[in-house]
Structures are given as C-alpha cells and as structure tokens.
C-alpha cells in the first residue's frame, strides 16, 4: 500500500477524531458510498520489493480524564492529533464557518451584528480569553478592539509580543443582548456560556497554546466554574484542559481603577506568564510600576 493510501487514511482518522471532539456520534453516509464500500476491495499486486514500514501517527499525550470535557475546568479527554499546517488551517476555517453560522441562542442571533470568532495566530503559544464581545467588538467582528482592547494590546506589546503572535478570544462569540437598553453591556448567563464554550474548546485544542490567560472574573467563572472573587484568584496558576492558566484582572477594570498598584498587579501576572513561556525579561520590564506595588 502506497504513501497516498496512508495519507488518506491519516486525514480520515483526523477528521473523524475532530468530529468526535465536537460531540458528533454519527456520520452520514450516502447510499452510493455504502454501495461502493460493499464491493470487494481491489487487492494490489504483490511486490517483490521490501514493504515500506508503516509510519505511526504522531500524537501528543493528553492528561487523564478528570471530568466530562463539556464541564468547567475539564481537561482534554483524548489524544489530540498533531495536524500539519495545511490541515490545521483547514480545521480552523471549518470551525470559524460553523461559529459564524451558529444560531443556538436565538435572542443573541436577533441582536448581534457580527459573530466575534477570535483573532491572532493559530500557532500561538499564548492565548487570552475574555468573557464576551462588547459594542465595539460586535460592530467590527473582532475581539478586544474598544478601549479595553487597546489597553490589552499595550500589555501584549510590553511583553514583547503582538496581537498577531498571540491568540485572543472570548467564551461567548456573540454580544449579550441588552433588551430595553440603548447602551451598556451585561454579563453572559451560565447557560449562554455553556452553549458557546464548545467553540472555545475547539480553538484551544487546535491552537494548543502553552499558556492561557483568563481576563476577569466572568472569564474565570466560564472556564473554571469558580465564582471566587478575581482578587483572590489572580496571580495564582490554575489548570484548564491540561494547560496552565493565569487569572488576572480584565483590562476594563484597569480603565475604571487607575491606581498604579492595580496596574502593577496585572503586570506581575504577566511576568509570571512570560517566565512560564521562557520569554526574556529585561530589567525595565521587571521594574514596571514597581514603586506602586503594595
């Protein structure tokens, strides 16, 4: 059997594993395909040349199942295949297409202008997760583009990175509707987060970042199911789907609270993230807001 055979077999296995991760349990098969499968297989002629060794599929180990994968704080429950660049990009495009077409929350569908899927590198080692799009994000279809997003961009740049080298997403892909209000935002409901978070799970599984950062209490609640105040959790490493997760304040909080001590706390969290990623840290970076620390 030739290399193209194994390439096709590998692609088929990866596709089926992707369907399984998305919760699919059945695959539709046309009558024509069933008829073709029922025909006797054509056995290739026996070759006198030595058979090429079967190449094992490249896989990365996954942590043991601790809880169902659709529950807050769940870890990966199965081995995730390592996709080549082309297959990974195709899988991400398919995920984006499905997210943009999602109508599982009719009240959000009726109110939204755009689905805010996510932005950045699908090969990112660092992934930021917020709670939900706001009015600016809904308008532009990109996460963290308002004032809070501009501050997040500055934080990322101060780390020596850029929005193009990290990945930024939200638990909710649609802006929470605000019936009867002409302005403002509201917190996503647990039901909304539970409905939408499978898209985030797939993003994380495809990107496979080395570190996750949860921005704000609602993001922590949606990811970990913890309603403990963000003040107690920030700065302390957690684990989500087998990945180190750093909870920190949402940039919007820093816009409301301009104290340098609060900015320093967020920066201390980012220094921990940089250390975890093995990024170089200059003395200037290490000493940002140092005099304001308490």
Image: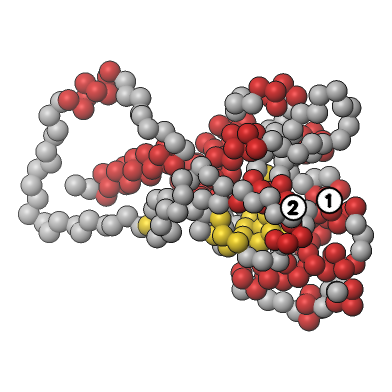
Q: Earlier in the sequence, mark 1 or mark 2?
A: 2
Pointers 1 and 2 in contact (CB under 8 A)?
yes
Residue extending farthest front: 228
Please tell me which residue is depicted at 61% across the width and 69% down the height of the picture. Answer: 277
- Residue drawn at 76 percent across, 28 percent down: 177
Quadrant in which the C terminus appears: bottom right
The residue shown at (61%, 24%) is 103
Q: Nearer the viewer, residue 218 or 282?
A: 218
Between 293 and 137, the one lying in front of the other is 293
Distance in Å between CA atoms under marks 1 and 2: 9 Å
Residue 222 point in image, percent of width and height: 64, 45
Report the side of 62 relative to 291 (left or right): left
Q: Give the secondary structure at mark 1.
A: helix
In the image, what residue occupies the spot 86% across and 35% down?
Answer: 184
Where, by quadrant of the figure, is residue 93 drawn? top right
**Picture disc at residue 41:** none
Q: Is residue 98 above or below residue 159?
A: above
Q: Residues within 10 Å of mark 1 (few under 14, many from 20)?
A: some
Residue farthest to the bottom, as pictured? 283
- Residue 96 coordinates in the image, percent (x, y): 58, 37
Residue 18 x, y percent position in the rendering = 43, 41
Position of 142 relative to 244 (above/below): above
Secondary structure of the residue carrying tag 2 is loop
Viewer can see residue 237: yes
Looking at the picture, the colour scheme in use is: secondary structure
Q: Quadrant of residue 179?
A: top right
Q: In x, y percent, where is residue 219? A: 69, 48
Q: Find residue 252 and name its label.
A: 1
- Determine which residue is flagged by label 2: 216
């Amino acid at each position: 059997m030739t290399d193209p055979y194994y390439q096709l077999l590998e692609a088929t296995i990866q596709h089926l594993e992707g369907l399984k991760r998305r919760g699919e349990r059945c695959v539709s098969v046309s009558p024509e395909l069933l008829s073709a499968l029922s025909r006797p297989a054509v056995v290739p002629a026996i070759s006198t040349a030595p058979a090429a060794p079967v190449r094992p599929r490249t896989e990365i180990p996954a942590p043991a199942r601790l809880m169902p994968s659709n529950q807050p704080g769940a870890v990966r429950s199965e081995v995730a295949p390592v996709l080549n660049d082309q297959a990974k990009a195709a899988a991400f495009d398919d995920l984006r297409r499905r997210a943009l077409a999602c109508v599982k929350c009719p009240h959000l569908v009726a109110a939204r202008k755009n689905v805010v899927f996510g932005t950045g590198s699908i090969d990112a080692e660092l992934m930021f997760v917020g709670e939900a799009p706001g009015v600016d994000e809904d308008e532009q279809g990109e996460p963290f583009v308002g004032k809070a997003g501009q501050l997040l961009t500055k934080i990322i740049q101060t780390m020596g990175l850029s929005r193009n080298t990290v990945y930024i997403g939200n638990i909710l892909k649609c802006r929470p509707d605000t019936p009867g209000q002409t302005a403002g935002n509201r917190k996503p409901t647990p039901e909304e987060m539970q409905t939408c978070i499978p898209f985030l799970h797939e993003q994380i599984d495809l990107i496979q970042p080395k570190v996750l950062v949860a921005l704000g209490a609602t993001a922590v609640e949606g990811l970990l199911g913890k309603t403990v105040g963000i003040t107690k959790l920030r700065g302390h490493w957690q684990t989500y789907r087998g990945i180190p997760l750093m909870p920190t304040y949402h940039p919007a909080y820093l816009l409301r609270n301009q104290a340098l001590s609060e900015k320093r706390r967020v920066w201390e969290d980012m220094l921990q993230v940089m250390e975890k990623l093995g990024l170089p840290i200059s003395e200037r970076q290490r000493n940002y807001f140092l005099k304001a620390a308490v």
